[in-house]
Structures are given as C-alpha cells and as structure tokens.
Image (cartoon, grey):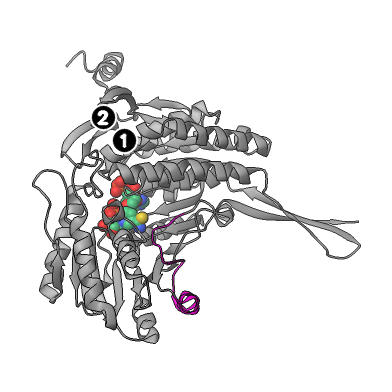
Amino acid sequence: VALNSNSFTRNLLRLYSQAPLRVPITLPNGFTYEQPTGLFINGEFVASKQQKTFDVINPSTEEKITTVYKAMEDDVDVAVAAAKKAFETKWSIVEPEVRAKALFNLADLVEKNQETLAAIESMDNGKSLFCARGDVALVSKYLRSCGGWADKIYGNVIDTGKDHFTYSVKEPLGVCGQIIPWNFPLLMWSWKIGPALATGNTVVLKPAETTPLSALFASQLCQEAGIPAGVVNILPGSGRVVGEKLSAHPDVKKIAFTGSTATGRHIMKVAADTVKKVTLELGGKSPNIVFADADLDKAVKNIAFGIFFNSGEVCCAGSRIYIQDTVYEDVLQKLKSYTESLKVGDPFDEDNFQGAQTSDKQLHKILDYVAVAKSEGARLVTGGVRHGNKGYFVKPTVFADVKEDMRIVKEEVFGPIVTVSKFSTVDEVIAMANNSQYGLAAGIHTNDINKAIDVSNRVKAGTVWVNTYNNFHQSVPFGGFGQSGIGREMGEAALSNYTQTKSVRIAI
Ligand code: TAP
C-alpha cells in the first residue's frame, strides 16, 4: 500500500503492466508479420493514456487474434492537437506535388504489401481472400487517383467587371474526424484519408472496434510513404467514446462517417453544436431488377454477386430482387441452384466464395431476420441457417414471394439474405424500387438500351449498375440519395467534401 501510494512506483508498475505496442502474428496462411497494437498518434504507436485495451476476435474461428489499445476521450484530445499542428505547420502549406508524391508512394506500398493486407483483412473481418484481394487492389488504385488530384485543385477567375480583379480558391478544412465501419475496413480507410490528404487536410480516423488491424498496419505505411507525423492519426476505440468525442470536438472541422443510418443521424446532431461539415455514407436496401429480355444466366450471376459478395455486408447490396413475371420461376430456380453452388467457409480456402460474418452480433442479427421473414410468410427458397457451428458463417439465403410491406423487404439486414418479388410492367417495378427511405444503388438487367436508360433515369439511387453489380471504380462517384447519405466518395466529387471556397475581390 505504501509503495502504491508513491506516484513514481505507480508509473513504474504501469509501465511494466502495459500491453506491447507490436506483436508478431501468424496469419492463417502461415505467414508471420508484425502487427502494431497501439494508438497511432503523431507518427508513433502509443499506449492509451488510461492503459485501456480490447481483444480482437477472428470471426472465422471465434478465437482471439490479439489485444489492441483502446483510445478514450483524453487520447482524442492528444490526437486532434497533433493533427492540428501537422495541418498548420506541415501538410496544408507544402507544395501540392509533395502531397501527390506521398500518396503515390502510399499506393505503391499498399501494392507491395497487398498479400499481407488482404490476409489481415480476411482474418480480422472474416471476408474471403478473394474479396479482400479485390479491396486491396481498389485501395491502391484509389490512393493513386487521389495523388493525381492533389495538384489539380483549381479555383476560378471570375469576371466581375473591369474595376475589380476577382478570384476564388479552394482551401482545406483542417482536422477531419473520420469514422469507418467493419465491412470494408481498409477500403474505407483509403476512401477517407485519400481525398482528405490530397486536398491538404489532416485526419484522426476511428476504425470500427471489431476490425482495427488493417488500418493500424497501413498507418505505418503512411510514415514510410513520407507523410509527415501527425497528418494521419488512428484511434481504435468505441464509437460511443471516440466517435462521439470527434463529432463534438471544436478543433475537428469535419466529420466523414460510413455506417448505419441511425448512427449517421446521431452524428449529425452531435456535430451540429460546432457546425461541422458532415458527410455520411449510410445504409441501403437496393433494388436489383431483372427484365425478361435480359441474358438470364448472366443476370443470375450478377444478382447473386449483388447480394452475396462480401458475405452480404455491403451498404449497396442488391438485397431486393425484382424479376419480371414471365421469367419469374425460371430465374428463381436458376438463382436457387447458383446460390447453392457458392461455397461458404474458411476465408483462406481459395475455393470459398463467402467467408464469415464479421461478428457474433451480426450473425445473430441475420438469423433473427430469417425468423422475421418466415413469420411474415416469406417463402424460404434456400439457406436460412448458420453454416457449421464454429465461426460466424451463414448460408446464402433466398426468400421469394415477399410483400412490399414486410420488414424483410424494408429493413437493412447486412448479411447474405435476399428477397425476390415479381413485377409485370416498368411503371410497377419503378414504384416498387423507389418504395424505400434509402437510395444508395440499383441494378438493371436488360438487353434493351432504351429501357436501361429510362429506368436509370427514374430510379432514385446514387449509383445505377446495368448488366453488372457491385462494380466500383476509383474515378466513379459513390454515395446515396435519401437516407443513404450526404456527399459522394471517389472520383472528383469526393474532393469537394474536403475543401471550402474562398472568394477574393480586389478593387483596382
Ligand atoms: P454503426 O453503429 O453505424 O458503426 C459504424 C461506425 O460508427 C463504427 O466505427 C462505430 O464504432 C461508430 N459509432 C457507433 N456509435 C457511434 C456514435 N455514437 N458516435 C460516433 N460513432 C459511432 O454500425 P454497427 O452498430 O456496427 O452495425 C449495425 C448495423 O449498421 C449493421 O447491421 C448494418 O445494418 C449497418 N451498417 C451499415 C454500414 C454501411 S457501410 N452502410 C456499415 C456498418 C454497419 P464501434 O466500433 O464502437 O461500433
């Protein structure tokens, strides 16, 4: 007791009890790497001030992977101060080509480490290696694309008459708080830091508590790429503490959030007190329409990919399938057999298309929705059960003959569950497709170009895919109509989320 009352001894004890800041991890493919486990603040991995930690679980085995430091409110203050200083003294004042070069370097380093990053993502999130490799490929392409934009942030010279010289410039915002979800941890990290850094901002990013590993690993690549200390800070921790504090912090000038509509709505309210700029990429319940004139075999593959890709944990998943009545039973049977051919299981087995759901919470949410759908009278065509009894695997599931007012048709499940309904006319299917609070994406399968353009024009969605689905490109803006969000990610559109316009008028 006497010893513990001595603050020197207390600090010493704390030092010795603290968890390591890096641990060697053997990935399920046998490869060993070093995983940073601290908070990444001002270019260093550090313990949280209060020494709090949390365990990271492998959703395929339900076993602990490692322990990571957990940021609390006081750590947010330190990270925001570091980001503010880096903004003022380094990143906002360098030549744009310095930012471009650093982002190109980062893209190269992601490419160099692609197999490790994909394996970390599969292990932490549960997604199949096939999906994780696709994510990492888009990450490097997107970071490179952002590097390309860095020295192309243009203002305007505005003709206001001969007695004035008037121009506008686009300036960065400052410290950006970025809160990301667990379904695409590394991809969302790149969608957030890429445009922020290209335009001269600094960031404090909170990964989801379920999946912090890839963002921590990638943050050390930022250093190697020549991004100065304090420009990128990563705070693993809970949404209620770190996310909430970032949203309210007076020195955070913008919040970029991806996740559920409920949390996005809440963040807007919290951010309102400091009138932050807010961009949100939220949920969806996207329609995927098959017309009778489509190439039906191709359409079946696309609608299955639309929902089962990434274990159904996709904000724009085509979770409501509409099939034209004349081909309804035919397409449904094809979808059933194709779905049953998709292999589920160990994400590291290259034969498996679908891995594990990310958490026990998601597994149970999905199984609860299966029960809801059955109780509402939806016809179970295939799936509807857990796959195995270890790991959070769910069989790809199809419900047919659903009604528009069923919860399974209206609410986002975020898992490998799809509903199928019948329609007869274009007007009818447009009404059904638009009967949602969401508006993230839509799919159309037809060989009639006029119909494709007509339906694309009338469907309320931020992205429309024709004869394809879940088909992303770094140059194409992505974001939602309605309650699916505010703002766009990727492409040139993402840059405007991170700049503010200043007008200068000089009297001559
Ligand atoms: P969310 O609550 O939206 O979590 C997303 C991110 O927001 C996580 O980093 C989370 O932190 C953080 N967060 C949570 N509460 C917050 C708060 N009060 N202030 C600031 N940040 C906060 O999603 P969830 O609870 O993980 O999943 C629930 C459902 O949301 C899913 O079933 C799915 O339907 C939907 N969802 C949608 C998306 C996309 S991309 N649209 C992504 C994930 C989930 P923690 O780490 O503490 O959770």
- Front-lying residue, 303 or 62: 303
Q: Position of residue 502 (x, y in %)?
A: 70, 54
Residue 495 drawn above or below residue 4: below
Which residue does the image show at 43% across and 50% down from the upper left? 248
How many tags in the picture? Answer: 2
- The residue depicted at 24 percent of the width and 20 percent of the height is 17
Which residue is depicted at the point 46% across and 52% down? 256
Quarter placement of the C terminus: bottom right
Residue 179 magenta-highlighted? no
Determine if the C-beta at disc 2 is less than 8 A from ligand 1.
Answer: no
Give the residues drawn in magenta, as a range: 448-472
Secondary structure at numbered mark 1: helix
Disc 1 under 8 Å from ligand 1? The reply is no
What amino acid does circle 2 point to?
Leu
Percent from the top left, x then y, of residue 13?
25, 16
Residue at point 50%, 26% (across, down): 224
Image coords of residue 302 (percent x, y): 34, 62
Determine whether the residue tagged by mark 2 lies in a helix, strand or loop.
Answer: loop
- Which residue is tagged 2? 27
Residue 243 shows up from this direction: yes
Inspect the image, locate mark 1, and give the three-letter code of the amino acid beneath it.
Answer: Ala
Could you tell me which quadrant the N terminus lies in?
A: top left
Q: Quadrant of residue 201?
A: top right
Q: Nearer the viewer, residue 162 or 401?
A: 401
Q: Are marks 1 and 2 in contact (CB under 8 Å)?
A: yes
Residue at the limit of the structure toward the left, as seen here: 389
Q: Residue 119's mark?
A: 1
